[in-house]
Image (spheres, rainbow, N blue to C red):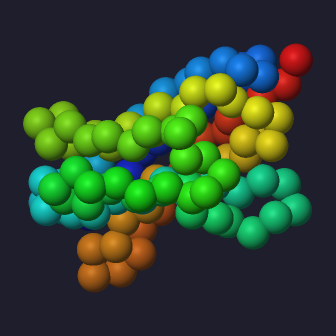
Amino acid sequence: QVQLVESGGGLVQPGGSLRLSCAGSGFVFRVAAMAWYRQAPGKQRELVGAITSGGITNYADGVKGRFTISRDNVKNTVYLQMNSLKPEDTAVYFCHLTWGSDYWGQGTQVTVSS
């Protein structure tokens, strides 16, 4: 069955960096487009960015120039490198896949605070 497992969240000071990972299994990773979403307390889940099977990326306006999505098709893992973090980036971050149906990871908490 399809599984997505995120890791790498934590507490970081404003201006700091974190790298999130999402390991996928149960599907053909190299042909799958992947995405990152986030959900802050009291807010709707929002798209952070996505990467195609060919490595083309797109980002939400609020993270452009600070966040980078990449993928390793050998490790079946997609990454979200987050730099220059702001308190408003605090959220639970989710990995997402559409493979017939929508699949979500369990989420990983990112807290940006001094």
The answer to whether 67 is drawn above or below residue 55 in the figure is above
Residue drawn at (67%, 18%) of the image = 16
The answer to whether 22 is drawn above or below residue 46 in the figure is above
Residue drawn at (84%, 54%) of the image = 41
The x and y percentages for residue 40 are 78, 53
Q: Is 93 displayed left or right of 73 in the figure?
A: right
The x and y percentages for residue 19 are 49, 27
The C terminus - image quarter:
top right
The answer to whether 7 is drawn above or below residue 12 in the figure is below
| Count of numbered circles on the image | 0
User: In the picture, residue 13 is in which quadrant?
Assistant: top right
Q: Is 99 displayed left or right of 110 in the figure?
A: left
| Residue 105 seen in the current view | no
The x and y percentages for residue 63 are 60, 46
Q: Is 79 displayed left or right of 109 in the figure?
A: left
Pick whichever, 2 or 80, lies toward us.
80
The answer to whether 19 is drawn above or below residue 45 in the figure is above
Residue drawn at (82%, 35%) of the image = 87
Residue drawn at (38%, 38%) of the image = 79
The N terminus - image quarter:
bottom left
| Residue 52 seen in the current view | yes
Q: Is 71 displayed left or right of 30 in the figure?
A: right
Pick whichever, 107 or 46, lies toward us.
46
